[in-house]
């Protein structure tokens, strides 16, 4: 079975950059490695994800309950797994996922009162890893950036914002939910900001390699 490494963090935290850098590093060593990114966005299976994020079910994240929104993202992963990368998961190698079930754990958990956080995680992991049969990640790297930095990085991208990115209170709740998940689930937390300044891509990557024992 492949080793599955999930890389997650708030919007603008550098998930895509670090996922690609890790892929290039491992491929350069001759390792059998596969890079995935979720949601798949351009694939048919992500249609409900796109509809939700574009505001089709309401302009605020909480307009759609955590369980319903989670199923949109989970089904996108399920279809991708069944039609594309299951063969890679079933053999030796490494799979890197830029966002995974971990993103549901952070963003959808943040819609709920704290007393329901643990039961929601139990429900989510049962849905994705038991009922849908998706492989659970062997390692989770969480790229930690304060919400203020996340917002600044989102603005610098200049792309059209989805309903998650537009909502400051939602991002603040997601940050708090991520701290809870990282502690409870043993995620490898990498601080991407030092003294209010974003650390370099290479500095962050060295921490990732060290945490993953690569």
Image (cartoon, rainbow, N blue to C red):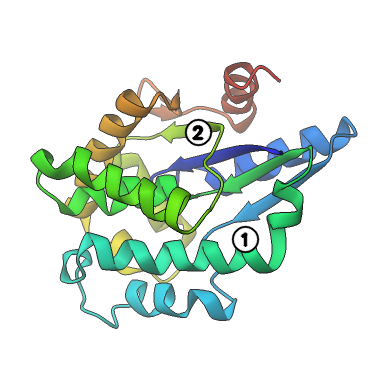
x, y percent for residue 143? 46, 34
Query: Which numbered mark, 2 or 1, is in the foreground of this view?
Result: 1
Q: Which mark is residue 140?
A: 2
- Location of residue 145 with respect to 113 vertically, above or below: above
Tell whether 164 sits left or right of 111.
right
Q: N-terminal of the two: label 2 or label 1?
A: 1
The residue where tag 1 is placed is 81
Q: Is 150 in front, or is 62?
A: 62
- Location of residue 168 with respect to 187 vertically, above or below: below
Tell whether 39 sits left or right of 191.
right
Question: Label 2 to label 1, Cα distance in Å?
Answer: 18 Å
x, y percent for residue 76? 50, 68
Any part of residue 151 in sight: no
Q: Which mark is residue 44?
A: none
- The residue positioned 62% from the left and 16% from the top of the image is 210
Q: Are marks 2 and 1 in contact (CB under 8 Å)?
A: no
Q: What is the crowding at mark 2: few (fewer than 14 residues within 10 Å), some, or many (at least 20)? A: many
x, y percent for residue 130? 45, 50
Q: Give the quarter of the figure containing the C terminus.
A: top right
Q: Give the quarter of the figure containing the N terminus.
A: top right
- The residue positioned 42% from the left and 44% from the top of the image is 102
- The residue positioned 40% from the left and 23% from the top of the image is 186
Any part of residue 91 in sight: yes
Under tag 1, what secondary structure? helix
- Location of residue 102 with respect to 47 vertically, above or below: above
Under tag 2, what secondary structure? strand
């Amino acid at each position: 079975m492949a080793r599955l490494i999930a890389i997650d963090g708030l919007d603008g935290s550098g998930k895509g950059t670090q996922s690609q850098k890790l892929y290039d590093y491992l491929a350069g060593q001759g390792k059998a490695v596969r890079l995935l990114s979720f949601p798949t966005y351009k694939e048919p299976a992500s249609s409900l994800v796109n509809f939700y994020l574009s505001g089709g079910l309401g302009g605020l994240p909480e307009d759609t309950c955590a369980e319903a929104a989670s199923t949109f993202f989970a089904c996108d992963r399920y279809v991708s797994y069944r039609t594309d990368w299951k063969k890679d998961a079933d053999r030796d190698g490494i799979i890197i996922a830029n966002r995974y079930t971990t993103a549901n754990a952070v963003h959808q958990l943040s819609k709920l009162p704290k007393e329901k956080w643990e039961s929601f995680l139990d429900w989510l992991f049962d849905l994705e890893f038991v009922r849908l049969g998706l492989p659970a990640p062997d390692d989770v790297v969480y790229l930690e950036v304060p919400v203020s930095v996340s917002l600044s990085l989102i603005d610098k991208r200049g792309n059209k914002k989805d309903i998650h990115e537009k909502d400051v209170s939602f991002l603040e709740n997601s940050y708090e939910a991520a701290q809870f998940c990282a502690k409870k689930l043993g995620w490898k937390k990498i601080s991407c900001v030092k003294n209010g300044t974003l650390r370099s891509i290479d500095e962050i990557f060295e921490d990732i390699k060290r945490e993953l024992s690569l």
